[in-house]
Image (cartoon, rainbow, N blue to C red):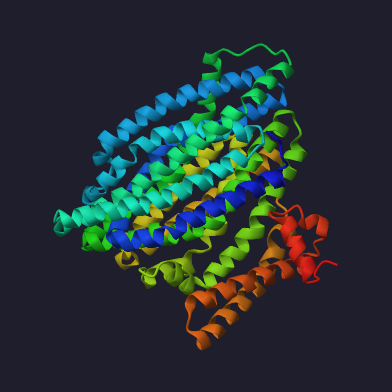
Amino acid sequence: MKKNSLVKNATILMIATIVSRVIGLLYRRPLGEIIGSVGLGYYGFASNLYSILLLISSYAIPMAISKIVSEQIAKKEYRNSHRTFYTALLYAVIVGGATALVCFFGGRFLLPANQQNALPALRALSPTIFLSAILGVLRGYFQAHRNMTPTSVSQILEQIANAIVSIVAAGALVNFALTAGSQKSNGAAVYGAMGGTIGTGAGVLVGLLFMIFCFVINRKFFKRELTHDNGAAEESYADILKAMMLMITPIIFTSFIYNCSAYVDSFIYSSLQGWAGVDVDSISAAYGEYSSYFTPVVSIPLAVASASTSAMMPEISGRYAVGRIEEANDQINKGMRLSMFICIPAMVGMTILAQPIMGVLFPASTALSWHLLMCGSAFILADSYSIISGGVLQSIGQQKKALINAGIALVLSLVFLAIVLVVYPPMGVYGVMWATLVFSLLCTVLNMNTLRKTLGFRNEIRHTYLEPLAASAIMGAIAAAIYYGLFLVLRRPFICLAAAIVAAIFAYMVLYVKISRTTEEEMRRFPAGGIIVKVLRKIRVFR
């Protein structure tokens, strides 16, 4: 139960989340080959709706527990922090169970009329909603104690189990469907998508078991906390529940809007494309490439923003609760700089190497996938800012403002999508991509404006954006030259791409240090900074 700094916590979460998302990305390749693009489409529609139901039951819990308990710990109200934990568990069991029942019995009314083949996959996810709610409480409690290691390890274990079970279950159910003669009505795709979602549940179960194990072995530490309590009056469970609801409800609605954006985009896309005469399988296949190829790839660098936000929340909440506003602003700038250090070069690299990235990762993908990545990688920056700024507003008690900002962005982005698909139906799934980008940009602008008014926050420009952007531009040119130069000779996409990525990483680190004049001590404060310093010493960048 060792407490860590913002940078160390962010680094732990970043590494774990990136590893988890890479695992999640890699298993999409065999999964896509097993269930096909149509099956991936069913899987994507079910996953979008599942994400909305999940946030009602569990998505807000880690953030709420992290904020409330971290404030109580900062004030040394340890008894109240324990009571908050047990109240959250009760909330998770009741709300998680109810939402799981809605998912199983009400799913058919929530899916688009022409996508009812996604219903078996959605129903297979219903137990996962219940388990995720309990898992969220445990993760939030450890994060409030500024210990991100249990959450990080559980994320990795969750994705490993998810990948293995998804592939095995999808393969088994596809074979069953083909043996039973269900291929005439896309039965193989239906059963394959259901197998993929069974893997999601298996992953959550493994993550939950690990978190329970961590909690059990740390029980003595949590009991010792009580001896250091400041003697403040114990809050009643009713008051704690009320405080939790006041915290959770705006986060749920804000998160609902974020996730609802993807769901409603898919609903509008499917409906308007059907209205324009596009056949159902083509709609599902195109959306399958968008949701199962493009989205997982861009989500890998977004893991950095998500990790920074999770690490920042207890730091900012604790400082804000005791009136240390300047220190809170400093933590925000640190978190944003950590994110941009990785997100900016990731955006540039994915734009330039979009075709080989998609070709190597997903041989079954079409040109649509790499066109989406090449045109839509700017989403990485827009969404990373949206995630961080929204998380900061929630950590300082501005949940309602974050909700309003997200609501405005959602309405405008949906209007944009509807107009695009009505005026120019051939835009197809590209319209979904552009609408998602518009949503993230609007959220970012509105949230940053609120932070300026509330905290007097001023974003640092040069070190956060300009220096990594300059290094990334040169890095991108080097990566492109290496990949396409080697490809002319070797004609081996995997080898050429691997060489280009390794060279790009080294080039970026060297260029960033030279352009920003970063010292060894400063570099050690970045994610994996100690490793970077050792590497740069060997090539004599640092002497």
Q: Position of residue 17 (x, y in %)?
A: 56, 50
Image quarter for residue 342? bottom right
Q: Along the horizontal axis of the image, is 366 left or right of 341?
A: left
Q: Position of residue 140 (x, y in %)?
A: 57, 33
Q: Position of residue 30 (x, y in %)?
A: 37, 61
Query: Where is the C terminus found, in terms of image quarters?
Result: bottom right
Q: Could you tell me how many numbered marks the image carries?
A: 0
Q: Along the horizontal axis of the image, is 447 left or right of 116?
A: right
Given residues 249 and 362, the one toward you in this image is 362
Q: Along the horizontal axis of the image, is 238 left or right of 522?
A: left
Image quarter for residue 75? top right
Given residues 13 and 233, the one toward you in this image is 13
Given residues 378 and 3, the one toward you in this image is 3
Q: Is residue 434 above or below residue 206?
A: below
At a point 70% along the width and 43% down the height, the residue shown is 6
| Residue 8 seen | yes
| Residue 461 seen | no
Residue sitting farthest toward the right: 543
At a point 46% along the width and 24% down the height, the residue shown is 91
Q: Along the horizontal axis of the image, is 524 left or right of 391?
A: right
At a point 67% along the width and 38% down the height, the residue shown is 454
Q: Is residue 185 above or below residue 101?
A: below
Q: Position of residue 316 (x, y in %)?
A: 68, 37
Query: Where is the N terminus found, in terms of image quarters?
Result: top right
